[in-house]
Amino acid sequence: MKSKLTRPVILALFILPVFMVYSIFLMIPLVQTGYYSLTSWNGISQKVFIGFDNFNALMKNNDYWITFFNTMKLTAVSLLIQITVGLLLAYLLYQKTKGAKIFRTIFFLPVVIAPVAIGLMFSLFYNSQIGIFNKILTVLGLGMFQTHWLSNINTLLYAVMAPQVWQYIGLYVTIFLGAMQTIPVETIESTQIDGAGKTRTFFNVVLPQLSGFMNICIVLCLTGSLKAFDHSWIMTGGGPGVRSAYLGVFMYKTAFTNSDFGLGSAITITIVIISLLMTGLFNQFTAGEHDN
Amino acid sequence: MNRLIKNALVFTVTAVLLTGIVGCGSGKENLGNSSTVQSETTSVATTTAKSKVSLVFATNWGEGDSKYTYFDPKFKEFQKANADTMDIVLETNSTEDFKTKIKIQTASGDLPSAFTYWGGAMMNNMVDAGLLLDVDEYFNASSTVKRDNFEPTSFSYYTAADGKTYGVPLESTRGIFLVNTEIFKKYNLQVPKTYDELKNVSKILNQNGIIPIAMASNGGTPAEFFFSELYNQYSGAAEEIKNFTASRKFNTSNAVKVAANIQDMISNNMFPKDTVANGGWGPCLQLYTDQKAAMTYTYPWMFESIPEEIQKISDIVPIPKLPDADIDPANIMSGFTVYGCVIKKAAFTDTVTHDAMVKLCDFLASDDLSTNLTKSGMIPAKKITVDMNGQKLIYQKMMSYAEGKNLIQVHFSTIPSQSALSMLDTSLDELFINALTPQAFVDKVQAALDKK
C-alpha cells in the first residue's frame, strides 16, 4: 500500500522531534537570554529595560577583559597542544605500536572522568603543603622550578589550564586514529615502496587526508575552550579575583554570586557572538582552502 | 526481525524525547516570569489527602556541617512528634551550594517554607521583592517565642532599610586569635603583643619550619574576618563598620592602612605562602591543628574541627597591635549575629499552613535546640543560660576571654550589597597573592559599592 504522506511531510515529521528539542532547550533560552541582557534584573525584581547599558558596562569592565583574554589564551593553548599532541600520539598508535590498544585506552581514560574530579585531583597535586607536583620536580632535579602553583600570579592561569588541556588530548587521539584507519593501506604501502620514510608519509600522505577531521577537531577545540568552566571553578573558583576565570566562570559569578542576571546574560551573549564569529571565520578560511 | 528492533528503537527514542519535552514544559513557574509568579504565589505548601500540611525546611546544617550532629536528631524528633499533622521535607546542602540553591529558588519563585540564612546584604533582594516575613508577625503569633527572648542587638543584622526585621537570629559569634602554647614553649618564645614582637617571633618560627599565623584567603575566607578584626584597631573604625550599610564607604584611610599591614605581614612570611591552597576555613585551621602553624584566627563554627588535645594547648590572646593602630586589641573582640532563620511570607500567611509554620519556627527558635547547638560551638542569639560544663574546652576559654570585651562588628555583617561582598572576598584573594596594591584593593571594593 502506497503511503498517503508526501515526501516533504515525511521529512518534516522526522525533523520535528529534533527541531522541538533544539527550539525548547536552545533557541528559546537563547532568545530569552538575549532579552535579559537588555534588562537590569537581579533574578527577583521586575526586569527593567535598559537597552545596551549592560554591554557598555562590560566593555568598560576590566574583569571582563581579563577573563576574555584568559579564554583566548586557553583557546590558543588548547589548539596548539591538544591538536598537535593528539595528532602525534594517534600517528604513533597507527604505527602498530606494541600495546597500542592499552595505550589507546589509557589516552582516552581521562576524557571519561568528570572534569570536577580532575580539577580536584590537580588542585591537590599543586598544593605546596601536601601536593606531589613540587615533590616530583625535586626528584627530577628540577627543584628550582618549585612554586606555589595556584598562588603565584605568573603560574596560576597556566596551572588551571593544564588539566583541561591534558584531559581532552585523548579525545583527539581517538578521532585522528579513527581517521587514519580510513586511509587505504595500499596508499601508505605504495608511498613507502616509493621510498618515503614515516615522517614524509605523515606529512605528505596522512596529514592531507585528515583535513576534514582536522576541521572537526579544531571546531571542537574552539567551542570546548570557549565554554570552559569546570576546571577553573573547582580549582580556584576563578580567583584570586578573576585571574584564573574564563568567560563562563565570570558569567556564573556575575549572575549567581552577585545576583546580576542582566549583566550575566550580556556576558553569555558575548560568548555566543565570539563563538559564532570564530566558527564563521574558521569556516570561511577552510572554505577558501577547499576552493583552492 | 531487524525491522522490528529498529521500529522499537525509534519508538523508544521518540517516547523518551517527548516525555522529556512534556516533563520540562509542565513546570508552572519559570525564570522568565519569576517576578510575576512570585507575587501571585500564595503558597508552596500543600495539604495531602490526609489533611497533613507539607512544608519545606532548608538549611546548610546537613552532613559535614559542624551543627549536623546536634541539629539532625532534634529535627527528626520534631518530625516524628508532628508526623500526624505535617510532612516536613528537610533539604540540606553544603554552604556554597546552599547559597546558590536559595538564589535560584528565589528567582524561580520556589523558596522553602522556612530556611536558615544570612541577613544583611545576603537577604536584601528577597526583602525588596516582598518574599520574607516580618518576624514580628511570627512573634505575635507564637505563644512560646517572643522578641524579648533575644539579645536586642542581635536583630540589627536582620533589620532591613524599612526598619522591619526579616529573620529570627539564632547564632551569634566571636572571633578568636589562638596560639599554640606548646610551640611557643618549645622555641622559648613569648606570645607577641606588638607588631615588632610578632615580626621577631615569626622570624624564629620560620627558621624552624613553622608557619607563624595560619591565615590565607580563598574566596575571602578567613581573611575577610581577619581584615575586619585588624581594622577595628584603628580610631573611628568601629563607627565606620557600623555605618557601612548607609555610608557605602569602604575607601577609608583605615582600610588602606590595614591592607598595607597585611601586605607587610605577607612580605615578612607570617602567613602560608600558598594562600589559595590553604585558604578557606577548613584548610586554614588544619595548618594550626596539624601544628604546622603556631597561631591562627578562627570562629566558633570551626570548633568541632579542633581536636581536644589542641584545645588544651591553645590559648586565646589578643591579636598583636599593629604599628600605627590606636586601639588596644586586648579590649576589643569581634562579636555579632551571623546566622538565623528566615520565613517565607506566602507560607506563613497561608491559612492552611500558618499554624504548622508557627510550630516549625517555634522549634527552630526553641531553647532546647539552641542549647543543643551550643555543643557545636554556637553562641545562641537567644537569652539562654548555657551550661559551661557540657561545652568544649575551647568554647569555655572563648566565653571566659569575651568577658568585659567591647564587642565590635565586621564588614561582612554590615556591607550593603552582595556584589560588593563578593568583590571584597575576591579582591582580598588578590591582595594575598600580591596582585593588588592596598589602594587598588580598596578602590576595587569601593567601585563595586558605587555601582548602582
Image (cartoon, coloured by chain):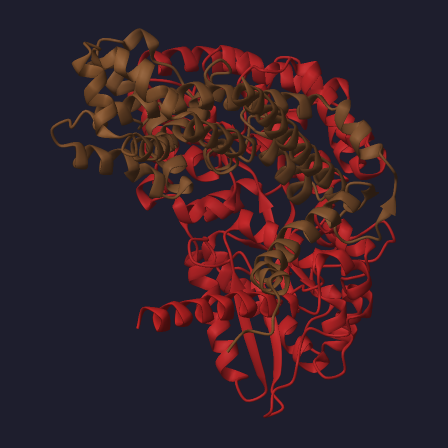
Chain colours: A brown, B red
Could one spot residue B252 in this view of the protein?
yes
- Residue B22 x, y percent position in the rendering: 61, 70
Q: Depth check: give the residue in front, B158 or B51.
A: B51
Query: The N terminus of chain B is located in which quarter?
Result: bottom left
Q: Depth check: give the residue in front, B202 or B218.
A: B218
Residue name at image x 67 percent, y 31 percent = B423
Residue name at image x 18 percent, y 37 percent = A101
Residue farthest to the bottom, as pictured: B50
Query: The C terminus of chain B is located in which quarter?
Result: top right
Residue name at image x 40 percent, y 20 percent = A81
- In screen coordinates, is B194 left or right of A257? left
- In screen coordinates, is B30 left or right of B298? right
- In screen coordinates, is A91 left or right of B441? left
Where residue A292 sits, quadrant-wise, is top right
- Residue B234 x, y percent position in the rendering: 70, 22
Q: Depth check: give the residue in front, A262 or B425.
A: A262
Q: Depth check: give the residue in front, A92 or B337.
A: A92
Residue farthest to the left, as pictured: A98
- In the image, residue B131 sits, relative to residue B440, either above or below, namely below
- Residue A60 x, y percent position in the rendering: 77, 22
Residue farthest to the front, as pictured: A2
- Residue A162 x, y percent position in the rendering: 40, 24
Residue name at image x 51 percent, y 56 percent = B93
Could one spot residue B134 in this view of the protein?
no
- Tally of marks: 0
